[in-house]
Amino acid sequence: MNCLAQLGFRVIAALDYDKAGSGADDSFTAAQGVADEVVRLPLGFAIERALLHGIPGSVLRQVMGTLNGTWHLNLQELGRPDDEKLRSASVKALKGKSGLHAEYVELLPLAAPPPVIVALLATIADLAGGTRKGPLTLEP
């Protein structure tokens, strides 16, 4: 029994799943050896994509516009009509400025939560409560 379990903690690991392959599989397997339960994002999703996926273009423009103004992200796509290009540039901006995840989430309106993140948090709650068992890989 690990020391966290002895203290009454239940460890839930949540992993990115950027791309399939041995690295992702090795991490998934390794996490199962040290956590009580493991869940990973859908294939092709890192946390940045999960935070941006499913957010309406108008909301994305507002939030990323605020971050762009504050953090000088140089998001040229804000003035263009293509939401997917803005989403792609925003993923890169969040990855490049690794401290902006919390600021991004704080700016999101409560009415527009990222659906993959909502599913991840619900799954973590289910795993922690014992109503589901892992290891699990989410679907987009």
Image: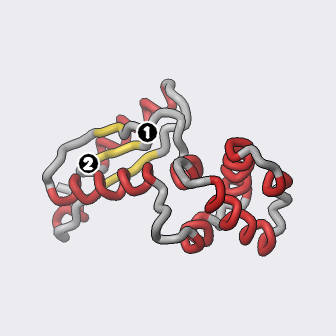
Residue placed under numbered mark 1 in the picture: 140
First in sequence, mark 2 or 1: give its number.
Answer: 2
User: In the rendered image, which quarter is residue 104 located in?
Assistant: bottom right
The secondary structure type at the circle numbered 1 is loop
Q: Quadrant of the N terminus?
A: bottom left
User: In the rendered image, which quarter is residue 26 located in?
Assistant: top left
Q: Nearer the viewer, mark 2 or mark 1?
A: 1
Residue placed under numbered mark 2 in the picture: 37
- Which residue corresponds to the image point at 17% horizontal and 47% vertical from the top-left? 132
Residue 110 in the image, given as x and y percentages of width and height: 47, 71
Q: Residues within 10 Å of mark 1 (few under 14, many from 20)?
A: some
Q: Which mark is residue 81?
A: none
Residue 34 in the image, given as x and y percentages of width and height: 31, 48
Q: Nearer the viewer, residue 6 or 35?
A: 35
Residue 98 in the image, given as x and y percentages of width and height: 66, 60
Tell me if 31 is positioned left or right of 46 in this view.
left
Residue 107, relative to residue 76: is it above or below?
below
Q: Residue furthest top?
A: 21
Q: Amino acid at mark 2?
A: Glu
Tell me if 111 is positioned left or right of 136 in this view.
right
